[in-house]
Image (spheres, coloured by chain):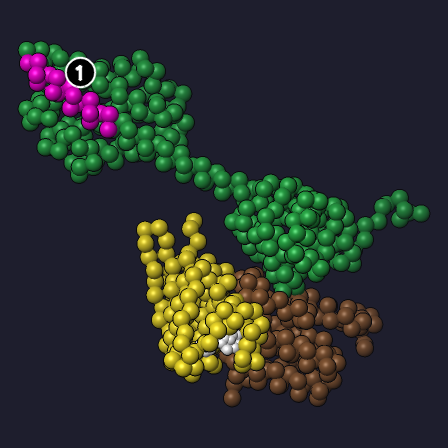
């Protein structure tokens, strides 16, 4: 399951508990969207490393209906599936970098990164 | 730099090491660098000795004038250690650099004596030695600075922890008296600590006192409110006390919603509310006995 | 199908969520609780989430729904034991569960219910409701 895989990776990278929880929660939101609205898809985890910092990148891809208005979809409370409409916007707030590309009828791709706090 | 000057220097270091060491120590003493209050003279003696030994072996290589070359690795390491130690012992950066610079005179004296008849070689050698010792002196300063920066950073962090103590006012009542200007990084750390403390102490009421905070920016104000919300999710009530007029205006100006938050003018007022929430009352002994 | 056990303690129902709660399990819990409230005429529900790994918007919504539905059926709900990391994350997510009562642990949750419902404490001299 996505959550467990993401959790294990954040632990391995030395993220603190709060950061772990934020990343796993964002992953949970995005994975659910991929299933509910994208008809299923794939998740790719990638470790980002430079001499300055370490981060975890999550990429969710599906070949579903796509999102016509991304700005609207990101708004708190906007939902077409009877949800709370907090998934996309919330995931964006929980992560440091967030990018959506989507094409109606073709599918959606969300890539998001959280960097580890330096200390 | 000519090869002959390098080998001359290596020669000389080898031949006159004892004398050189003695003169160097005399020089160090004259420059006031023998700080018996900060380190023992045997330690200094040893460091000088060690340095000369490594210096000599580095001088046998062709890369003599480039102190970043691998041949200089052990000399740089030694100086790094010395410099780091002294930064912590309380020496000044110039005192540390003088350790190296004070080798110049004894070394020049010897070169002058040895090469009295070969003027060109003498000038060449002195130039080479100056160049190398200057580089090494700068190296010690650089390391010194890095060490100081680390010390300062550590002290800042310690201060940060000290300046935001979470204190237990009463069974089940915590207080966080915040003092000084809040930036968002500090606020975040403090708030996470607070929430953790709530769990550890099993507190039901928390007073965040910001009497000692002159102003807040948007981000900090938002963090405060988020903390109150997070505490509520954990089953703990938050009271914010000591909001200065200016901060109150910031909050209004930002359109932040404080309606779900209990605010009080002073820590004492907040404490009274906290006691009430815990269904506790303070009774004076006098009135009790009536 | 796997289900989350519901314990009865006098007039209260206690649910301890101990697993990584997937969606179907959460929805089943919502149904089960509703049925139990009706069957037992319980006046309070305690949901202990201290072992829960995360609360995302889906689980958050289920918790909110349980509170609303319970209230319609005459029972107060208290969510207890939320960990700091989860609380911080939920706030950032934008979910404040404003309609849900909260408490630090089962013990304080129980007392909160008793205060809200105006019932005397268990274990005291007048503990027989
Ligand atoms: N992968 C996706 N493919 C198609 N539409 C999506 C996808 N993800 C999100 N959406 C659209 O964006 C809306 C908002 O998503 P979200 O913020 O997660 O809220 P919710 O899941 O509660 O509806 C969804 O209701 C849906 O219309
Ligand atoms: Mg969603």
Q: Position of residue A46 (x, y in %)?
A: 34, 65
Taking the image as shown, residue B88 lies to the left or right of residue B170, namely left
| Magenta part of the chain | B118-135
- Give the letter of the green chain: B
- Residue B130 falls within the magenta-colored stretch: yes
Report the front residue among B228 and C128: B228
Label 1 secondary element: helix
Which image quarter: residue A102?
bottom left
Q: Looking at the image, is A58 positioned above or below residue C1?
A: above
Q: Residue at x 62, y 63 (%)?
A: B234
Residue bearing the label numbered 1: B108
Q: Position of residue A27 (x, y in %)?
A: 45, 70
Q: Mark 1 — on which chain does it sit?
A: B
Report the front residue among B22 and B93: B93
Report the front residue among C11 and C70: C70
What count of labels does the image hold? Answer: 1
Q: Position of residue A55 (x, y in %)?
A: 38, 59
- Give the letter of the brown chain: C
Q: Colour of chain A?
A: yellow
Helix, strand or loop: magenta stretch: helix
Taking the image as shown, residue B130 lies to the left or right of residue A98, namely left
Taking the image as shown, residue B282 lies to the left or right of residue B23, namely right
Ligand 1 within 8 Å of disc 1? The answer is: no
């Amino acid at each position: 399951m996505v959550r467990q895989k993401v959790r294990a990776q954040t632990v391995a990278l030395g993220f603190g508990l709060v950061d772990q929880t934020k990343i796993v929660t964002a992953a949970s939101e995005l994975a659910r969207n991929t299933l509910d609205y994208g008809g299923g898809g794939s998740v790719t985890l990638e470790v980002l490393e430079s001499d300055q910092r370490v981060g975890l990148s999550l990429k969710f891809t599906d070949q579903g209906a796509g999102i016509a208005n991304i700005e609207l979809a990101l708004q708190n409370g906007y939902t077409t599936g009877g949800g709370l409409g907090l998934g996309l916007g919330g995931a964006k707030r929980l992560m440091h970098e967030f990018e959506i590309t989507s094409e109606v009828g073709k599918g959606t791709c969300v890539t998001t990164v959280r960097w580890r706090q330096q200390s | 730099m000519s090869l002959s000057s390098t080998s001359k220097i290596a020669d000389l270091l080898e031949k006159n090491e004892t004398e050189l060491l003695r003169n160097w120590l005399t020089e160090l003493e004259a420059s006031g660098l023998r700080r018996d209050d900060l380190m023992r003279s045997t330690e200094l003696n040893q460091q000088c000795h060690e340095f000369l030994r490594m210096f000599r072996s580095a001088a046998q290589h062709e890369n003599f004038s480039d102190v970043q070359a691998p041949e200089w690795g052990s000399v740089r390491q030694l100086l790094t250690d010395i410099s780091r130690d002294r930064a912590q012992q309380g020496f000044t950066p110039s005192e540390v650099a003088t350790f190296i610079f004070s080798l110049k005179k004894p070394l020049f004296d010897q070169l002058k004596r040895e090469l009295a008849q070969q003027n060109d070689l003498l000038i060449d050698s002195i130039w080479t030695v100056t160049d190398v010792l200057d580089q090494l002196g700068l190296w010690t300063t650089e390391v010194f600075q890095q060490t100081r920066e680390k010390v300062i950073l550590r002290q800042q962090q310690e201060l940060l922890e000290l300046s935001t103590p979470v204190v237990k006012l009463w069974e089940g009542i915590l207080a966080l008296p915040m003092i000084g200007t809040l930036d968002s990084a500090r606020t975040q750390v403090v708030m996470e600590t607070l929430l953790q403390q709530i769990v550890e102490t099993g507190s039901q009421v928390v007073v965040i006192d910001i009497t000692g905070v002159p102003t807040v920016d948007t981000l900090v104000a938002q963090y405060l409110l988020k903390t109150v919300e997070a505490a509520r999710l954990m089953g703990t009530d938050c009271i914010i006390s000591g909001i200065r007029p200016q901060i109150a205006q910031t909050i209004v100006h930002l359109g932040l919603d404080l309606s779900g938050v209990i605010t009080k003018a002073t820590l004492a007022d907040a404490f009274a509310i906290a006691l009430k929430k815990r269904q506790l009352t303070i009774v004076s002994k006098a009135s009790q006995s009536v | 199908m796997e289900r989350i056990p519901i314990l009865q303690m006098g007039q209260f129902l206690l649910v301890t969520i101990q697993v990584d709660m997937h969606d179907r399990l959460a929805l089943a819990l919502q149904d089960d609780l509703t049925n139990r409230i009706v069957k037992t005429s319980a006046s309070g529900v305690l949901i202990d989430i201290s072992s829960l790994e995360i609360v995302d918007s889906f689980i958050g919504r289920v918790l909110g729904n349980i509170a609303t539905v319970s209230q319609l059926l005459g029972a107060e709900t208290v969510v207890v034991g939320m960990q700091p990391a989860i609380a911080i994350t939920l706030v950032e997510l934008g979910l404040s569960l404003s309609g849900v009562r909260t408490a630090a642990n089962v013990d304080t949750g129980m007392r909160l219910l008793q205060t809200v419902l105006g019932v005397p404490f268990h274990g005291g001299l007048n503990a027989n409701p």
